[in-house]
Amino acid sequence: MAGAVAVALSLTALPAVAATAASPSLPAPGRRAAAMAEEETSSEGLGWLFSWLPAWCPTSLQHLKEAEDKMLKCIASTYDKRYVYLPNGNKIWTLSFSPELSHRTPLVLLHGFGGGVGLWALNFEDLCENRTVHAFDLLGFGRSSRPHFDTDAQEAENQFVESIEEWRKEVGLEKIILLGHNLGGFLAAAYSLKYPSRVKHLILVEPWGFPERPDNAEHERPIPIWIKALGAILSPFNPLAGLRIAGPFGLSLVQRLRPDFKRKYSSMFDDNTVAEYIYHCNVQTPSGETAFKNMTIPYGWAKRPMLQRIPQMDQDIPITVVYGARSCIDGNSGSTVQSLRPNSYVKTIAILGAGHYVYADQPEDFNQKVKDICDSVD
């Protein structure tokens, strides 16, 4: 069930969102959207649908920009924000902190599924104290370009990886410390497999997609019939289609179903800033979300599990796996990585009092642990 739990914890990707949003209690436009939402399974030839959806969902790129600005307004450190343009025409929204500290290996942050740069708001100031920190919205997420992804899992993964490499080239970074959370952890590992000479340390924070789905998964922890039925009904949809189907009710659903995010960031905000940011990140045209769907099998397991490939990674790349001690995600992947790389540096760190969103649950402890890892590099 580790994979299923990972998806359930992915920001607003909750079965309850889709179930509530698609209920008969929605007004006529909502039922119309629900009937049409299956079209999201293919992004080709659907410009009419995507141009219609914003009229139902009160969002726009400007709304997303304003929501991100609110997320970052409490950060006292100066930073540069810009689009990094890739050779293929895509653009990657990027924040850079402490660029003057370029003599040390920069830290690059990759967010998880459905997230964006704004969710690192509790971490930027500590992490950039003594080195440059870059964070960017993954291709297909946040304010970055939302292109068409290949339907093949390997090709979609490669599109993500190549976008990271092209971004690195355009920014002019020789080597990096690469940190990824959730889907970002999976992509950080995939990047390190393909471009090992660029990674001086790999930090995996509650990574998604590492274990393969066991053959007896349903026998060990039987999945209730109603969940299977709901999964069958929703299988043609993208993971967050329910949020878009809900239209103007989507924001209140995020607030009601994920009140924990407000608590996590309570030291910075006393309103619904975080929920608004998450909402506007995820009701734009689905792109990276569609790629993620094509990279999974039922209940959120990866089609191409990373543990099957981790032994192929360059033995000289040090790996640190960070988990929340209270997380529902199976933390055994860290020890499995150690067993698969007996001649390499692999360390597992548990953050006490933290769940899946380690960096927001216990930011001070998380920040210090990451800084210690970075200091071990240079």
Image: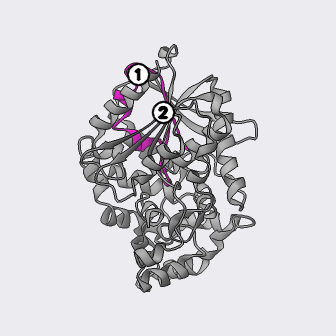
Give the residue at x 55% y 61%.
Answer: 212
Q: Nearer the viewer, residue 137 or 357?
A: 357
Residue 150, x across and y down, in percent: 72, 58
**Hey, which quadrant is residue 165 in on the image?**
top right
The amino acid sitting under disc 1 is: Asp
The residue carrying mark 1 is 375
Position in image of residue 227 (x %, y %): 44, 80
The residue at 54%/65% (across/down) is 55
Residue 190 seen in this snapshot? no
Q: Residue at x 67, y 28 (%)?
A: 170
User: Is 88 positioned to the left or the right of 197 in the image?
Assistant: right
Per the image, label 2 sits on a secondary structure element best described as loop
Q: Which part of the image, by quadrant, shows the N terminus? A: bottom left
**Magenta residues, start to end:** 109-138
Where is residue 314 shown, x and y percent of the image?
A: 62, 35
Q: Where residue 161 sits: x, y (%)?
A: 65, 43
Say whether residue 116 is magenta. yes
Secondary structure of the residue carrying numbered label 1: helix
Mark nearest the camera among 2 and 1 is 2
Residue 236 disc label? none
The image quadrant that residue 237 belongs to is bottom right
The answer to whether residue 238 of the structure is visible from this angle is yes
Give the mark nearest the N terminus, 2 or 1. Answer: 2
**Residue type indicated by callout 2:** Tyr
Q: Please name the residue that numbered disc 2 is placed on.
A: 345
Looking at the picture, tell me which residue is in the foreground, 335 or 283. 335
The number of numbered discs placed on residues in the rendered structure image is 2
